[in-house]
Every structure is written in structure tokens, then in C-alpha cells.
Amino acid sequence: MPTTKPPADSVAAKAARPRRKAKAKVDGAAPAAGADLKKAELIELVVARSGLQKKAVKPAVEAILSALGEAIEAGRPLNLPPLGRLRVARTEQKEKGSLSVLKLRRGAGVKDSGKDPLADTGE
């Protein structure tokens, strides 16, 4: 039984498809400017900085993102050092959901208290 080659156009179509991006390495280096920070990368960054296991970090990050989304949707200002102060400038209802314009004010520099924010408090 002879084997048949796929048509040349399907081979070309496969070659023209965009490739999936590789997972970003978490090595402490800053990502390229303009690159979106996605949830999976955020989780990996938190795992790397905290030393906690991914199975403990993932639900916490998802809960935080959910709470932040609800606060923004409600129009609540956020004061979250060292991220900064965030407020909702305006919100518009669109066909596929709402569009919120946010303003973020950050300090001139993040002040280091010298304490490890993830250290045990002895509780």
C-alpha cells in the first residue's frame, strides 16, 4: 500500500501558522516592554518569589484577581502598596462587557522597610 504525501498547500498552511509561545522563564529578569503579563506567568513569579508551592499559590492568586476585578467593577479606589493607588476614571458599557479606564499612581520609588513581607509573623 503506497503512502501518499499531503498536498503541498496543507504543508505550507501548517508552516504559516503562528507557533505557540514558549512559557516565560522566571529568572528575575524583567520581561520585554509591552509583553502582556498573563495569569500563568504571574503565578510562576509568585511561586519563585515566595518559595511556596504552585498548588498553594494558584488559588490565592486567582482569588486576589477576582477580588480586584470586583472592586474595579464596583468603582472602588484601590490603595495597594507597593503597586500604588488605582482609581476608576470612567466606565463604559460595551456590547461584550464593560470598559474601564483606570488611573494608577505610583510613588517615585518603592520603599524597602528591610522586612521580608513573606516572613512568618509568629502567629
Image (cartoon, helix red, strand yellow):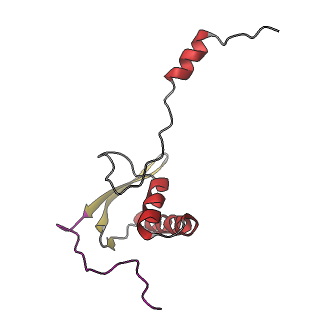
Occupied quadrant, residue 75: bottom left
Residue 83 spot, x, y in % from top left: 31, 67
- Which residue lies at the image location 51% right of the left edge and 36% below the top edge? 20
Q: Is residue 106 in sight in this rendering? A: yes
Residue 97 spot, x, y in % from top left: 48, 51
Residue 119 covered by magenta stretch = yes
The outermost residue toward the right is: 1
- Which residue lies at the image location 64% right of the left edge and 10% below the top edge? 7
Label tally: 0
The kind of secondary structure the magenta stretch mainly shows is loop
- Which residue lies at the image location 66% right of the left edge and 13% below the top edge? 6
- Which residue lies at the image location 49% right of the left edge and 29% below the top edge? 18
Residue 49 covered by magenta stretch = no
The residue lying toward the viewer, choosing from 68 and 44, is 44
Which quadrant would the N terminus be assigned to in this image?
Answer: top right
The outermost residue toward the left is: 108
The outermost residue toward the bottom is: 123
Q: Is residue 69 in sight in this rendering? A: no
Q: Is residue 7 above or below residue 67?
A: above
The outermost residue toward the top is: 2
User: Is 107 placed left or right of 52 in the picture?
Assistant: left
User: Is 103 placed left or right of 24 in the picture?
Assistant: left
Residue 35 spot, x, y in % from top left: 35, 45
The residue segment tinted magenta is 105-123
